[in-house]
Amino acid sequence: MLFSHRSVRASAGDADRLLHFNRQLIDQALALVAAHDLPGAPAYAQRTGPHLRHVIEHYEALVLRGADSLVDYDRRPRDRALERDVGLARARLNALKQQLAGWSDAVLEQPLRVHGQGGPAGEFDFATASSIGRELVFLASHATHHYALLQLYCEQHGIATDPNFGRAPATVAHALGDRAASAPADPTQELECLTYQPAA
């Protein structure tokens, strides 16, 4: 079956939702940074700093690359100051959020090439075609993975996080669906489903 270019393009609504989701993930990182400013919080550099530095630098590789159509996540600065300084982390996260706020669906459709290193020991380089939107999907998944690694640490140290912090969206949606399926049936809702509703 052939698909037109129009049929596979992300809609403006899809782009807005993807951008909003990535800003929400940055907000979760900002909340975690703020939690380390509270009295009695563990040292930021102990565990959280290295994970968030890694997440921030991946976002910066895409968002702050300028007019270049090339992104390379592997050649990042690995800024150790970013692992230790909550103020620096906060400033860099806010800068990323501000940049994403100015993006549109047209930006997300722009093609680019991703360079990186492959092999068990990074023994070869590769390049592959992608788009800004597709890379935002990767960055969201990547950030969520690192948040998942931090979740147990946060629990152990009494750091409050969002209930879905570090959980994949599909996992959350599946759990909500299971919960809804196991809930007692509401006869009024069943009747509503059988009632004709004209299209809006």
Image (cartoon, rainbow, N blue to C red):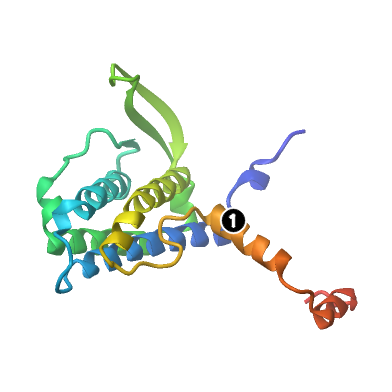
Q: Quadrant of residue 115?
A: top left
Q: Quadrant of the C terminus?
A: bottom right
x%, y% of residue 187?
84, 80
* Residue 129, x across and y down, in percent: 45, 31
Q: Is residue 142 visible?
A: yes
**Residue at the extreme bottom of the image, as rendered:** 188
Q: Nearer the viewer, residue 115 or 70?
A: 115
Q: For the N terminus, which image quadrant?
A: top right
| Label 1: element kind | loop
Across and down, in percent, residue 164 comes to 46, 63
- Mark 1 sits on what residue? 11
Foreground of the two, 196 or 182: 182
The answer to which quarter of the image holds residue 132 is top left
**Mark 1 residue type:** Ser
Instruction: Kindly give the residue lying farthest to the top in the view shown.
Output: 123
Is 65 on the left or on the right of 179, as rendered?
A: left
